[in-house]
Amino acid sequence: MAVDPDLVAAAMADASQYMFDAAPLGWMHREAGVLAGATGVPVPMLNGIWAESLDPDPVVVTAMLDRLDASAVPYCLQLRPGTSTKITDQAVTRGMRKEDAIPLMVLEEFSLIAQAERVDGLTIRGLEPEEGPAHIAVVADAFGMPEELFAQMMTPELLRAEGLCCYVAEAGGQPVTTGMGLTAGDFVAIFNIATPTQHRGRGYGAAVTARVVSDGRAAGAQLAWLQSSPMGYGVYERLGFRTLERWDCWVLEPDARPDRNPSRKPA
């Protein structure tokens, strides 16, 4: 089955909009093929611009970058392959750092999912909205970041959002991996698959990913998508995910604020 990249890019923007809308300190604006938003959490990938269109309006992108600059949080700019250099030049002018391209992966064929979900000694359970700290603890451990950062976003209000499910997997009586899924329409989006270092290499991350996909399909999704980190890429390939596009990514850290750039227009 041929998958239309435009539809998946739109689904990705829909899911991001959903998350920004639910973030207690967040804001979101979507216009002319561009989604911008901030959660207020000082992590670049939790604030930024995602250009769902191949030809986003440079004027809109400029205005959104100015608003992010005024928010004083680190942020990212993610663009589909082939986006105009008028947009990429904006990243360079503002002192953003080019990162490795991020694979946008899709799963259309589900034959490996049921097997991957079954791992001896592993139990996967869905979390209630008030159990967010269980998810946060595993994510923070896996990413080596303070729990307080994730707690700012992973609130009970977010976890009550329609279509969102959060999971923790346990082995030997202790949590070993976690993940989150958002089902909307024909798509299930997969986020926060995280396994602490000491528990990796045992199929736990693949099992939670498979559970998210299975539950999404049961809720009506026809296709799964995710953006992969380098560490998770092989895991997702073995589950049958394939790379649909590689999105260019720039990041602005706090020590590279564009205030020092005289060409920047005031927000």
Image (tube, rainbow, N blue to C red):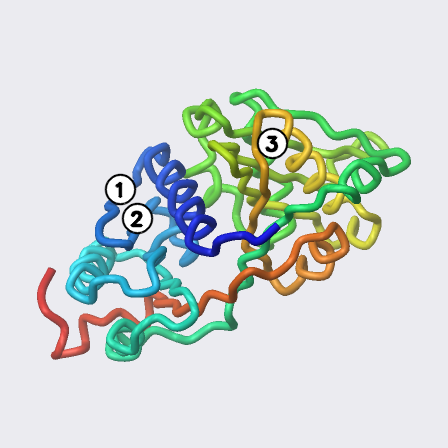
Report the residue at 59% width, 57% height from top: 228
The amino acid on which the numbered mark 3 sits, given as a three-letter code, is: Gly
Dot 2: element = strand
Q: Residues within 10 Å of mark 2 (few under 14, many from 20)?
A: many
Q: What kind of element bears circle 3?
A: helix
What is the three-letter code of the residue carrying label 2? Gly
Asked if labels 1 and 3 touch by Cβ distance under 8 angstroms, the answer is no
> Residue 216, which numbered label?
3
- Please name the residue that numbered disc 2 is placed on: 37
Q: Position of 188 compared to 22: left or right?
A: right
Disc 1 target residue: 27
Q: CA distance from mark 2 to mark 3?
A: 25 Å
Locate residue 137: give its quadrant: top right
For residue 50, above or below residue 98: above
Give the distance between the C-alpha atoms of the residues marked 3 and 1, in whole angstroms.
27 Å
* Percent position of residue 235, x then y: 73, 55
Q: Find out whether the residues at labels 1 and 2 contact each other: C-beta distance under 8 Å.
A: yes
Identity of the residue furthest to the right in this view: 120
- Of the image marks 2 and 3, the number of the one nearer the N terminus: 2
Sequence-earlier tag: 3 or 1 = 1
Residue at image point 70% right, 34% down: 211
Check if mark 2's residue and mark 3's residue have beta carbons within 8 Å: no
> Is 83 left, or right, of 234 in this rendering?
left
Residue 128 higher or lower than 52, as above or below: above
Residue 255, image quadrant:
bottom left
Q: Pinpoint residue 240: horizontal percent, then vertical percent.
A: 72, 52
Judging depth in this view, the residue of 250 and 184 nearest the camera is: 184
| Coordinates of residue 63 in the picture (x, y in percent) | 16, 59
In this rendering, the answer to whether 152 lies above or below 229 is: above
